[in-house]
Amino acid sequence: MSLKSSALQKTLKKGPWEFSPILRDLQVAHFWRLTPAGFWNCVYEDQAMMIAFVEAQSEMRQIEEKMISKK
């Protein structure tokens, strides 16, 4: 759980989970169908890719919702 103080943590984008890195990790682990321990045992590069994918998906969903609401 040293992710909190790592360089990776400093480069992560803010999202709805920004109030709790642990909650973010749990949400990402759930999305990828991993146990929390399975997620935390991954190397930081893999964690970063999984987090980035979920963040991008969240951003795309927000953009789509804005586009739909403008119609």
Image: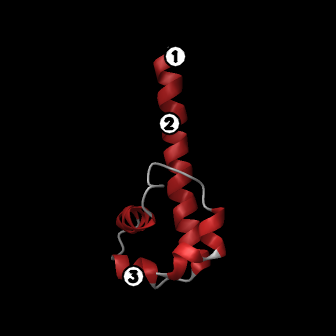
Q: Residues within 10 Å of mark 2 (few under 14, many from 20)?
A: few
Circle 1 is placed at which residue position? 70
Question: Are the two marked residues, 1 and 2, in contact with CB atoms closer than 8 angstroms?
Answer: no
Q: Position of residue 19 (x, y in %)?
A: 44, 56
Circle 2 is placed at which residue position? 62
Q: CA distance from mark 1 to mark 2?
A: 12 Å
The residue at the point 37 percent across, 82 percent down is 37
Mark earlier in primary sequence (3, 1)? 3
Question: Are the two marked residues, 3 and 2, in contact with CB atoms closer than 8 angstroms?
Answer: no
Q: CA distance from mark 3 to mark 2?
A: 29 Å
Q: Position of residue 29 (x, y in %)?
A: 39, 69
Q: Is residue 62 above or below residue 18?
A: above
Q: Residue furthest top?
A: 71
Q: Position of residue 39 (x, y in %)?
A: 43, 77
Q: CA distance from mark 3 to mark 1?
A: 41 Å
What secondary structure is marked by label 1? Answer: helix
Question: Are the two marked residues, 3 and 1, in contact with CB atoms closer than 8 angstroms?
Answer: no
Q: Residues within 10 Å of mark 1 (few under 14, many from 20)?
A: few
Callout count: 3
Circle 3 is placed at which residue position? 38
Tell me the amino acid under the disc marked 1.
Lys
Tell me the amino acid under the disc marked 2.
Gln
What secondary structure is marked by label 2? Answer: helix
